[in-house]
Image (cartoon, grey):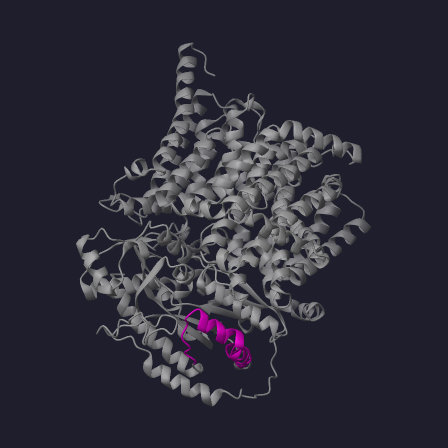
């Protein structure tokens, strides 16, 4: 199962260099009312944090003449947000901060009638890698040791996550399949709660974004075992990747901004310009680095192509999950 | 009230049965080794609701609960008028939000209530029903950055000007 | 004492003229935001966040703490004056606050709420200062089984809350719990109870939708119908003398509830996922249980205002603990604060206390100062709220409807939810006529979505074996106490029922 983004990544870097002097297209379209900045997750998660960070940067540099109004619509794994944006009465003033449920939710619930290709690409702000974490008290320091422990417990090894069909469960399902292990998976309502219960040793391991586990890692409570990224993460240089171990698997959570279906080209160009400026701001670049996000800049056409491949990959991954 | 009591219990019982039926879309039993299924919690709670309706009916038959003893009507003529004018007013208010925007609907509702139900003077009614939405606009949109519905597109020019003022 | 000097530095920082001004402005804004039905500290903090880039972080933290405290005090105001709990934490405040206001004693209720909040907040701050790191490890020892046991305990306090009609009370509890289950099943990730297959139900039904429907629309219609449309305003004018008398009376009649709420509230508040709502509810229940005349509760007992108010302030301060010591948000508000910390370049997590002492103690120091400012400003505004109550009812009533609908939209941003509010309101009016108690449903919709997932997570942990609730060292005793509390009144009732039947006269 190949899930690399290396090729796209290199192309994206090239595109970035070309793009760097901002396209100085004259902006004749400007928003006339507050911009509905829908967040596909509840307050407090990684996506919410990123959305509010983006909003703060826009505010700081006064990039929009009307405010971005963040609204959390996390209900139903993002179904609520997708339905809201899909039927937006004013598509020129409606944008959405997405994560991978942008791909998975329409697949898992085809009765929603959502076709993500009708949405308007705006910006790919970065992708968030996943890492396998255990508590330091378990004494486990390597993947082999971990596998041995898990096998020894015959399915009683307890892992926490954000729910069946969510990003982390896809990674866990892949590992279960690749290493022939079985774990007892407990769904929680958010990455924060998962990290908390790992810190309290209610659960034994998690697959989580570095951003959500970083505090505990720095306090020496969490131990990273393996990263599901293409290359080693700069902040965790000693943590091997799954690919190094001979399994061609990497998995990221996308942090992208998309526009409502039916957004006019002028409006799309406006938002693409705004988010390019945010992307290039020192604040966002520092955020990417400190939270271990990988840059994956793409133009609108590349984003559409990326969506298409992601939908196919997730369809396969979810099918493997038995969904 | 006596008739109303049993009718209400009957309607609630039907609703409970609907909820029970709807819950069965997910497993309602005890999945071995995994605890109750996804539908179990709402199914069994709805079953308790149904049982409660049964007990309410039993109390009705025995005439032990106050409403089942009372002979007064559910609402008298005055009560009905009140509920239709006020409750109906609220329904029209909410329906208007999607047509003439939240602020327009507030103005119309306040004027209707103050002038026709409250029998206040024209000056007070008009003044309050115009001042309130303006105040709300500055509070919600200006201070709290919460965007309220702007209704159908014919209100756009007005809101374009208002947003120009506050941002 | 190193802690005291750190705290002293933090307080001095908060007392600088510019910062003091920020506190006063922040508390006042927070008070009014909290008093609006539908809006709460989360809105106040969210609008502040983007401007934190413009002011120095220390000023931003202080402003944040001030808004947070102001909003906590404000929650009681709509509960007492309008009868609409603006936040789930203030539901229990309506039980006795509303009757007091009806009796023309709104000022007593408001003063009691303010003073109890102040004491609750102060007690929590002191605990916080002294034991933060220790308490953090207590909080971590609470896994799903412990939280579920705690929810059972909260439900146990329900038993005493309903009306006299047992089947109707149980119906109401279950109804709230089922409404809370609508949307998605967290464990299997499947859509659940999407009523009539309307997509709007996918997002579930929030507490505010039910609460505003029941209290803002249903209760209002009922009041209008009962009073024939014109409620005589019995609220007397506020005078300095009257306020002093109220203060003395609230101290005399509310100290017990305040004490219970302050301590219980803090300990429930620090537990992850529990939060201020179960804390205020349990404090109310305990205050009623230990009282010599429990019959006074629900009829305007100042203790019944003091207990939940002390508890929700204490718990809200307590809920900062998991955020600061572990970097884990206990509520939407703390989640947004956490986002703010990331924007300032701080790393939330266990190292925050060690690496960012100035930030942490600046925040705690401003809690103390904000709390003092909040009680003074709140007391100063009470005459304004009383004046509002003295408006003719035919002006107040439409204003409450407008506030409910606009506030409801501000909270949910969805017209579907506004229609639900109207439907719940009309339904609540009918049920109210037939003596169905609705407060249990409103509370159950908050507790259900905590109780069900923790129940099922626990059973997943134990591979389906329910003994997990009895064998874990912390969960076990809580479960046993909760079961006793639930079963005792039921047994008593059954026995009384049998006795009454035996005597041949239906009660």
Q: Main secondary structure of the magenta part?
A: helix
Question: Foreground: A306 or C145?
Answer: C145
Which residue sits furthest top?
A: C503
Q: Is residue A271 magenta?
A: yes
Q: Is residue C54 magenta?
A: no
In this view, the residue in front, C213 or A102, is A102
Q: Indicate the position of residue C389 as horizontal and vertical percent values.
A: 72, 40
Q: Is residue B146 left or right of residue A173?
A: right
Q: Classify A109 as above or below B40.
A: below
Residue C418's place in the image compared with C230, above or below, is: below
| Magenta range | A269-297
Residue C446: tell me if it is visible.
yes
Q: Position of residue A74 (x, y in %)?
A: 45, 59
Q: Residue at x 42, y 77 (%)?
A: A295
Image mark count: 0
Residue C111, by quadrant, is: top right
Point out residue C385 in the picture as x, y percentages from the top left corner. 72, 42
Percent x, y of residue C196: 41, 51
**Residue, x 52% and y 54% (percent of image)?**
C334
């Amino acid at each position: 199962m190949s899930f690399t983004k290396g090729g796209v990544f290199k192309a994206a870097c090239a595109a970035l260099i070309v793009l760097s002097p901002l396209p100085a297209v004259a902006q004749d379209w400007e928003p006339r009312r507050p911009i509905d900045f829908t967040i596909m997750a509840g307050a407090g998660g990684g996506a919410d944090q990123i959305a509010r960070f983006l909003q703060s940067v826009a505010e700081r540099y006064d990039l929009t003449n009307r405010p971005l109004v963040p609204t959390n619509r996390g209900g139903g794994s993002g179904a609520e947000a997708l339905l809201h944006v899909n039927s937006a009465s004013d598509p020129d003033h409606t944008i959405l901060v997405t994560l991978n449920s942008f791909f998975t939710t329409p697949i898992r619930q085809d009765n929603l009638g959502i076709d993500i290709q009708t949405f308007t690409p705006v910006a790919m702000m970065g992708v968030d890698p996943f890492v396998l974490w255990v508590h330091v008290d378990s004494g486990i320091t390597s993947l082999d040791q971990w596998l041995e422990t898990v096998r020894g417990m015959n399915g009683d090894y307890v892992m926490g996550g954000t729910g069946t069909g969510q990003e982390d469960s896809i990674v866990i399902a892949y590992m279960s399949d690749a290493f022939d292990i079985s774990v007892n998976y407990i769904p929680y309502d958010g990455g924060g709660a998962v990290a908390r219960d790992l810190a309290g040793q209610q659960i034994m391991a998690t697959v989580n974004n570095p951003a959500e586990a970083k505090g505990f890692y720095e306090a020496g409570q969490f131990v990273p075992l393996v990263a599901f990224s293409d290359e080693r993460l700069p902040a965790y240089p000693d943590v091997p990747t799954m690919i190094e171990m001979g399994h061609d698997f990497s998995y990221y959570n996308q942090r992208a901004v998309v526009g409502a279906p039916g957004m006019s080209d002028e409006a799309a160009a406006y938002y693409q310009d705004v988010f390019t400026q945010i992307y290039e701001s020192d604040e966002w670049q520092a955020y990417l680095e400190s939270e271990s996000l990988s840059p994956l800049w793409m133009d609108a056409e590349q984003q559409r192509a990326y969506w298409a491949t992601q939908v196919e990959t997730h369809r396969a991954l979810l099918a493997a999950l038995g969904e | 009230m006596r008739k109303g009591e049993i009718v209400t219990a009957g309607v609630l019982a039907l609703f409970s049965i609907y909820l029970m039926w709807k819950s069965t879309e997910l497993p309602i039993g005890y999945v071995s080794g995994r605890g109750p299924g996804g539908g179990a919690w709402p199914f069994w709670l709805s079953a308790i609701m149904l049982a409660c309706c049964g007990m309410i009916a039993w109390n009705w038959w025995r005439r032990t609960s106050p409403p089942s003893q009372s002979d007064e009507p559910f609402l008298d003529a005055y009560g009905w008028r009140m509920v239709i004018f006020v409750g109906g007013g609220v329904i029209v208010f909410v329906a208007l939000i999607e047509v003439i925007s939240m602020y327009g609907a507030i103005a119309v509702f306040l004027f209707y209530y103050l002038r026709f139900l409250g029998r206040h003077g024209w000056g007070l009614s008009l003044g309050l029903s115009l001042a309130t939405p303006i105040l709300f606009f500055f509070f919600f949109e200006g201070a709290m950055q919460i965007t309220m519905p702007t209704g159908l597109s014919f209100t756009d020019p007005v809101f374009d000007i208002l947003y120009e003022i506050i941002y | 004492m190193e802690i005291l000097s750190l705290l002293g530095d933090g307080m001095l920082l908060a007392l600088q003229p510019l910062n003091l001004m920020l506190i006063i402005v922040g508390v006042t804004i927070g008070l009014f935001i909290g008093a609006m039905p539908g809006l709460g500290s989360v809105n106040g903090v969210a609008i502040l966040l983007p401007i934190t880039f413009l002011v120095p972080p220390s000023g931003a933290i202080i402003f944040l703490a001030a808004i947070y405290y102001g909003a906590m005090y404000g929650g009681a105001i709509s509960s007492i004056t309008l009868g609409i709990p603006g936040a789930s934490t203030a539901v229990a405040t309506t039980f006795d606050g509303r009757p007091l206001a009806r009796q023309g004693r709104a000022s007593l209720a408001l003063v009691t709420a303010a003073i109890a909040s102040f004491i609750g907040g102060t007690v929590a701050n002191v605990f916080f200062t002294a034991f933060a790191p220790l308490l953090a490890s207590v909080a971590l020892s609470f896994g799903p089984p412990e939280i579920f046991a705690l929810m059972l305990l909260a439900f146990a306090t329900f038993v005493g809350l309903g009306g006299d009609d047992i089947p109707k009370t149980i119906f109401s509890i279950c109804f709230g719990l089922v409404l809370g289950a609508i949307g998605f099943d967290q464990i299997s990730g499947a859509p659940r109870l999407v009523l009539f297959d309307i997509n709007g139900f996918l997002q579930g039904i929030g507490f505010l939708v039910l609460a505003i429907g029941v209290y803002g629309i249903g209760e209002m219609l009922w009041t209008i119908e009962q009073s024939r449309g014109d409620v005589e305003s019995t609220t007397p004018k506020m005078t300095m003398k009257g306020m002093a008398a109220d203060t003395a009376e609230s101290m005399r009649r509310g100290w017990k509830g305040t004490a219970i709420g302050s301590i219980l509230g803090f300990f429930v508040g620090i537990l992850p996922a529990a939060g201020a709502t179960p804390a205020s509810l349990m404090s109310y229940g305990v205050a009623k249980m230990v009282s010599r005349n429990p019959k006074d509760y629900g009829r305007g007992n100042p203790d019944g205002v003091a207990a939940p108010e002390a508890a929700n302030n204490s718990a809200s301060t307590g809920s900062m603990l998991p955020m600061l010591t572990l970097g884990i948000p206990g509520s939407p508000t703390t989640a947004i604060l956490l986002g703010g910390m990331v924007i300032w370049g701080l790393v939330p997590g266990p190292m925050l206390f060690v690496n960012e002492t100035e930030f942490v103690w600046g925040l705690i120091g401003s809690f103390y100062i904000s709390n003092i400012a909040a009680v003074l400003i709140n007391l100063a505004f009470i005459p304004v709220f009383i004046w509002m109550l003295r408006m003719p009812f035919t002006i107040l009533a439409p204003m409450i409807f407008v506030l409910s609908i606009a506030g409801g939209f501000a909270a949910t941003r969805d017209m579907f939810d506004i229609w639900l509010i109207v439907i719940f309101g009309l339904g609540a009016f009918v049920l109210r006529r037939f003596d169905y108690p609705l407060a249990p449903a409103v509370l159950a919709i908050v507790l259900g979505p905590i109780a069900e997932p923790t129940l099922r997570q626990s059973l997943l942990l134990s591979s389906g074996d329910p003994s997990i609730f009895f064998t874990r060292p912390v969960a076990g005793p809580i479960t046993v106490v909760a079961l006793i509390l639930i079963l005792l009144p039921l047994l008593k009732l059954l026995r009384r029922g049998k006795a009454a039947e035996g005597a041949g006269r239906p009660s």
